[in-house]
Image (cartoon, grey):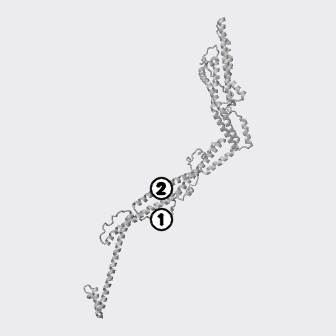
């Protein structure tokens, strides 16, 4: 092997040739054999090969690492695009030519930009999911405002805009539900406030029992909107409304009792005005009572104390109140023409009060029942009594018409004669309606008696008996009228025969005897026509009763209504006038 100079003067540095030359010099000086020299040179060549081999291996390993890094970069790039939901990216190089390092250098900016976009997307997902988690916690009632839950982890495998939009849609739905729930909560709280004001209750303690966040110091967005809070608020409102309803019912009962007691004892207006705040709601509905403190417990207790005081005062004035109710009862019976014994009733009331065997409230309740029953009975008699009054009025006109027809001077031109003529015409129309009116009365009276099983009395006299008596009197009057007509015809016949035998003798005036024919009819006409004397006579024999006017006062001159089963014709009405005087039947 040729040995070069150990020192290259041109290069000025140590080289393999210079070192080999130096080794040759040493070997020459030492006297090494050629065999040893060759062996050592072979060893040097082997060591050089090992060094080159290691270098090659290191270079190959570095190349493999670069290729793996490039592959990982491409895989990461693909994963980022998939996670972000992107099909392509503008920063990715289209060409794959060039060295490995050049390719890595080209893809690095795209990776960096995608990583930055991924971090921003993760932050967006975290924000949306945090809001969703917060609202869900508020709705479920598991969120603690003082110690809120941690930020939820986003799913890094799916960070697409589509997925983000789904979260945004879910968040909007939850925000809408939260707004609706918050509106309901505020409505409930407002209702609780109004109810507590009317009931005189502490609003703060009532609403904080439902949830501490419902007080006024908490912001609107921090108020609880959970299902439990809404349910408890609804139950609280229902309970308060029921309490309001019960208190109003209690207050109205007390107001009614107060008014009844005031009316019984004639309490002055000044004293009543002290409880206007109680009586003003006597007919109000639950929703109409909105005045603060209108249904407070102390107000109800005040009304209860006043009712108790008036009850005690009422007991001391029991006799006065009982006699007042008895007077009311007597007035009802008097208007209904029902005969009772008021003196015996008052004596019985006195005895019950003095004996103490009956509670004052029970006695008044019993009298109230009697008054109610009397009103019912009076109502059932009203239709018949109205027709009885019309019948009596018609009979009075009938009696007046009889007297009017007997008046020989009724057609004279005297003062007021035209008024009597008009009244007579109206009276005849009214008298002609008596038969139908009487028939209706009989039918209704019998139906009333069959329904109740008792006779219908008018001031103690059975009404049907009065009707029967009127029929009898009417029949007697008709018989008397028939006899008078026969007697008149007989006298006329005798006069005609005498004139035929002895001749007519003119007379300047009508003989007095002819007027006497009317006398018996005139005298008996009033009684036969149902005048007050005959009707009162019947009442006196049967029951000794008295007639009662519409005002409830006793009237001994009012006739008991007669019954007329026969219509009075105008010729019959005119027959009361003297037969020899030609007078028209009607004016």
Image quarter of the N terminus:
bottom left
Q: Position of residue 420 (x, y in %)?
A: 60, 21
Image quarter of the C terminus:
top right
Compared to residue 287, the image places residue 40 above or below, namely: below
| Residue 14 seen in the current view | no
Instruction: Check the image and name the residue furthest to the left.
Output: 10
Q: Position of residue 319 (x, y in %)?
A: 71, 41
Left or right placement of residue 397 versus residue 230 in this view: right
Compared to residue 147, the image places residue 515 above or below, namely: above
Circle 2: element type: helix
Instruction: Check the image and name the residue furthest to the top.
Output: 502
Label 2 CA crowd tier, 10 Å (few <14, some 14–19, many 20+): some
Label 1 CA crowd tier, 10 Å (few <14, some 14–19, many 20+): few
Left or right placement of residue 381 versus residue 1 in this view: right
Instruction: Check the image and name the residue furthest to the front.
Output: 35
Q: Position of residue 270 (x, y in %)?
A: 63, 43
Q: Position of residue 511 (x, y in %)?
A: 67, 11
Choose top left, top right, bottom left or bottom right for residue 402: top right
Residue 177 numbered tag: 2
Choose top left, top right, bottom left or bottom right for residue 429: top right
Front residue (pair 10, 402): 10
Compared to residue 391, the image places residue 482 above or below, namely: above
Front residue (pair 178, 32): 32
Circle 1: element type: loop
Compared to residue 227, the image places residue 566 above or below, namely: above
Question: Could you tell which of marks 2 and 1 lies nearer the N-terminus?
Answer: 1
Residue 150 numbered tag: 1
Report, in whole angstroms, how far the alpha carbon at label 2 lies from the one at label 1.
Answer: 23 Å
């Amino acid at each position: 092997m040729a040995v070069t100079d150990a020192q290259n003067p041109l290069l000025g540095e140590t080289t393999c040739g210079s070192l080999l030359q130096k080794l040759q010099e040493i070997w020459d000086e030492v006297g090494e054999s050629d065999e040893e020299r060759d062996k050592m040179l072979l060893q040097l060549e082997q060591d050089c090969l090992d060094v080159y081999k290691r270098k090659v291996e290191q270079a190959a390993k570095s190349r493999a690492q670069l290729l793996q890094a490039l592959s990982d970069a491409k895989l990461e790039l693909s994963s980022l695009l998939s996670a972000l939901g992107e099909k392509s990216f503008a920063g990715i190089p289209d060409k794959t030519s060039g060295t490995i390092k050049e390719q890595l250098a080209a893809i690095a900016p795209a990776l960096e930009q995608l990583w930055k976009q991924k971090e921003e997307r993760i932050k967006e997902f975290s924000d949306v999911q945090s809001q969703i988690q917060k609202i869900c916690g508020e709705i479920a009632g598991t969120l603690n405002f003082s110690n809120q839950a941690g930020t939820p982890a986003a799913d890094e495998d799916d960070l697409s805009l589509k997925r983000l939009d789904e979260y945004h849609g879910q968040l909007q739905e939850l925000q809408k539900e939260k707004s609706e729930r918050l509106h309901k909560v505020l409505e409930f709280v407002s209702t609780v406030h109004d109810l507590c004001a009317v009931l005189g209750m502490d609003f703060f303690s009532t609403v904080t029992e439902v949830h501490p966040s419902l007080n006024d110091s908490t912001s609107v967005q921090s108020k609880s909107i959970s299902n439990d809070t809404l349910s408890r608020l609804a139950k609280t409102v229902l309970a308060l409304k029921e309490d309001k309803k019960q208190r109003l019912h209690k207050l109205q009962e007390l107001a009614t009792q107060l008014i009844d007691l005031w009316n019984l004892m004639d309490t002055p207006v000044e004293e009543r005005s002290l409880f206007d705040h109680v009586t003003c709601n006597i007919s109000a509905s639950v929703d109409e009572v909105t005045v603060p403190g209108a249904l407070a417990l102390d107000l109800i207790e005040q009304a209860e104390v006043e009712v108790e005081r008036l009850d005690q005062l009422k007991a001391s004035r029991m006799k006065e109140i009982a006699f007042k109710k008895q007077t009311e009862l007597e007035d009802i019976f008097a208007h209904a023409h029902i005969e009772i014994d008021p003196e015996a009733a008052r004596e019985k009331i006195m005895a019950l009060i003095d004996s103490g065997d009956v509670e004052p409230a029970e006695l008044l309740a019993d009298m109230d029942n009697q008054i109610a029953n009397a009103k019912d009975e009076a109502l059932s008699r009203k239709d018949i009594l109205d027709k009885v009054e019309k019948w009596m009025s018609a009979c009075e006109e009938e009696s007046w018409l009889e007297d009017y027809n007997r008046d020989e001077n009724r057609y004279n031109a005297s003062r007021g004669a035209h008024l009597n003529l008009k009244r007579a015409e109206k009276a005849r129309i009214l008298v002609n309606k008596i038969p139908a009116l009487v028939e209706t009365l009989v039918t209704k009276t019998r139906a009333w008696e069959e329904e109740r099983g008792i006779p219908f009395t008018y001031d103690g006299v059975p009404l049907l008996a009065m009707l029967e008596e009127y029929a009898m009197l009417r029949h007697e009057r008709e018989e008397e009228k028939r006899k008078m007509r026969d007697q008149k015809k007989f006298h006329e016949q005798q006069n005609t025969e005498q004139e035929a035998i002895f001749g007519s003798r003119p007379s300047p005036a009508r003989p007095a005897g002819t007027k006497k024919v009317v006398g018996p009819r005139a005298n008996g006409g009033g009684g036969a026509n149902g005048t007050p004397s005959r009707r009162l006579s019947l009442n006196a024999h049967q029951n000794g009763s008295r007639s009662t006017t519409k005002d409830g006062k006793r009237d001994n001159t009012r006739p008991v209504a007669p019954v007329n089963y026969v219509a009075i014709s105008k010729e019959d009405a005119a027959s009361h006038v003297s037969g020899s005087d030609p007078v028209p039947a009607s004016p």
